[in-house]
Amino acid sequence: MTATDHAVGLIRIAALAASDKLATDLVAFDVSEQLAITDAFLLATGANDRQVKAIVEEIEDKLREADAKPIRREGHQDGRWVLLDYGEIVVHVQHSEEREYYALERLWRDCPAIELPAEVHGPAGPGSAGPGSGSTEG
């Protein structure tokens, strides 16, 4: 089983929204083979708490326009690691320190990457080099 086309579409909408707010290290994984509860993850990084919150709000706005409604939202108060659960997709927006410390991409590196739109260019932040860094160049 692979992520549905709808889930991939939502990931791309969320990635574009995050990129609009200058998120870095954007990377998406098809986790449908590993997890029964969701199809895909999007990881994004903000440089500070305020940027993390701005990224989250933009993602929520754009997904709302696509008629996607969150099931759960956690961590927004602190602005260090915000999890947005939309059922089919889960979005993790992390402060750069949390992203580096928890390195979620290491946990999911065996899952297929989801190609993000060319417009998603988030400048590289710490630890972004190497495979799975979110680059769509090839």
Image (tube, rainbow, N blue to C red):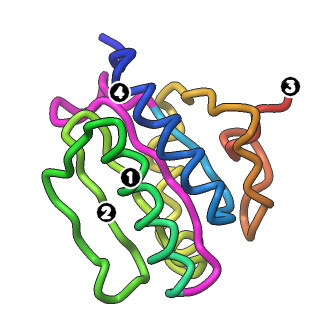
Q: Report the Cα–Cα distance between label 2 and label 3.
A: 30 Å
Q: Report the Cα–Cα distance between label 4 and label 1.
A: 12 Å
Query: Which quadrant is home to the N terminus?
Result: top left
- CB-based contact (under 8 Å), mark 4 and mark 1: no
Q: What element carries label 1?
A: strand
- Which is nearer the N-term, disc 2 or disc 1? 2
Q: Disc 2 residue type?
A: Leu
For the point 78% across and 46% down, which residue is it?
A: 130
Circle 3 sits on which residue?
A: 138
- Which is nearer the N-term, disc 2 or disc 4? 4
Along the line of sight, which residue is nearer the eye, 42 or 50? 50
- Which is nearer the N-term, disc 3 or disc 4? 4
Q: Residues within 10 Å of mark 4 (few under 14, many from 20)?
A: many
In the figure, residue 66 lies in which quadrant?
A: top left
Instruction: Give the vertical position of 100 relative to 130 (above or below).
Output: below
Q: Disc 4 residue type?
A: Ala
Mark 1 or mark 3: which is in front?
1
Circle 1 sits on which residue?
A: 91
For the point 50% across and 32% down, which residue is it?
A: 110
Circle 2 sits on which residue?
A: 83
- CB-based contact (under 8 Å), mark 2 and mark 3: no
Task: Report the magenta residues as a range.
Answer: 30-48
Q: Report the Cα–Cα distance between label 3 and label 4.
A: 23 Å
